[in-house]
Amino acid sequence: MADFEGKGEKLAAASLALAGALLSGEAPAAEGQIATEPVPITHAHTPNLAEAGLPKFTLSEDFLDVRAEPELYTVKPGDSLSRIAKTLLHDAKAWELLAQINKIKDPNRIQVGQELLLPSEQQLSVWKGEQGLVKEKQLITYQVKSGDTLSEIAEELLGSAKNWRVLADFNGLKEPYIIHPGDKLKVPRTIKEETIQQYPRQERSPKASERVEKSIAEKVEQYRPFLVHGRGSAYRESQIKSHSHYREEISSDINQMCGRSRIWGDASLETQATVVSQMIDHLEQEGFSKSEICYAIALCRVESGFNPDAAAGTTSASGIGQFIDSTRAELCSRAGIQNTNPFCMTVNLHCLSESLKESFRFARARVKAGDNEALYRMAYAYHHDGPTLQYGGARIADRDVLPRMAIIRTALSTDESSPTGQ
């Protein structure tokens, strides 16, 4: 009897502990006071039933509809927020919700190994409802006038010419993005800045900040002599290796520059012009000379055709400079950069500037000072072949890189305030 009474007291104590947890203010006390979101059970308010002498048990999801632990996802190589959202939440546009609940300011900067909190079904449902209201209430109609371009309309109504793709996406426009006087375009009235900005802004040097920012359309016209107006050949299926990035899906994230395929040059002229513009800004910040910037542009034209999503089928080479995985990982590791996404523009620009510095160091130790033609030939040979110089890089430089530099220099010098204008 005494033993039975002792167990009864322990059972009563356990019941009181559980009741106290439920009535502590962190769980609803009565109908009509239900919280908007269920409160997860944590160790802070779960009664320790083992101390009460009772067997351990678990609460099933049917018994209590809350998660004992938040659901997390670990970022893998090649991931982007939109890709994660499409795969796990079945909606690529839900990248904005992922960024919001994880307090990510720059949606382009997620790192391999980073843990992301996934939204609950209720959070996802609420977000989808809000998106419907945004589409319904925050759109206006703009009638195209004679002489209008998407970039000019975006600059006037969305605050930046770089948001021209937002207009294209909202209105289902495809390459070559032609609009006519009288056309009616749907325009988002108010959207968060980080959503409508197509590309993250780079901090600029004092000299660069003094330049008048050109629209995408103006940059296309200026760079047209050296942009790619056709695409390269696709790899045959039998040629594609398992370590290649060629078969990987193209990102649908509006905050990320995208090509149309993994093929050389297969990107719109607007995307190509933006790639070139960001290269100029970044390399100028890094202290490269006008001539070196022209060489870098010629190099990337040869390597990727200014397609940020270009990838080789026979190697892991990818991105604007076609860096293989091991080179990219090494260049990022030196700077403590954990994100090695081969198609991230920030990663590509970092690898480009660092590889240029290394190529120039290699070349200057082997050519006569002042012989720029020999310098750039040797630098490209090192970029293409590595230190062995045995894979034809010098011939490619003579055929495709050096002649193109003069065309690039002429095109950029039409802008007196351009970094290559002198």
Image: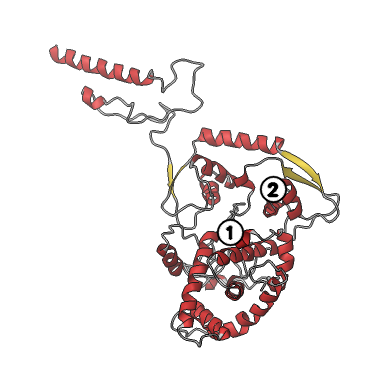
Determine whether, in the image, residue 386 is placed left or right of residue 295: left
Question: 120 or 242: which is nearer to us?
Answer: 120
For label 2, the residue is: 159
Mark toward the start of the polypeptide (2 vs 1): 2
Amino acid beneath label 2: Gly
Judge the density around disc 1: few (<14), some (14-19), many (≥20) Cα neighbours within 10 Å.
Answer: few
The residue sitting at 13% across, 12% down in the picture is 2
Neighbours of disc 2 within 10 Å: few (<14), some (14-19), many (20+): some
- How many numbered marks have been drawn onto this rendered protein structure? 2
Under mark 1, the amino acid is Arg
Provide residue 53's location: percent of width, then percent of height: 20, 23
In the rendered structure, the answer to whether residue 176 lies left or right of residue 2 reads right
Q: Residue at x 57, y 33 (%)?
A: 126
Where, by quadrant of the figure, is residue 212 drawn? Answer: bottom right
Q: On screen, 80 above or below 264?
A: above
Task: In the rendered view, tell whether residue 61 sits above or below residue 33.
Answer: below
* Quadrant holding the N terminus: top left
Element at badge 2?
Answer: loop
Q: Position of residue 373 (x, y in %)?
A: 58, 85
Q: Which residue is mark 1?
A: 204
Residue nearest the observer in this picture, 361 or 23:
361
Residue in the image at 46% along x and 57% along y = 339
Q: Nearer the viewer, residue 61 or 23?
A: 23
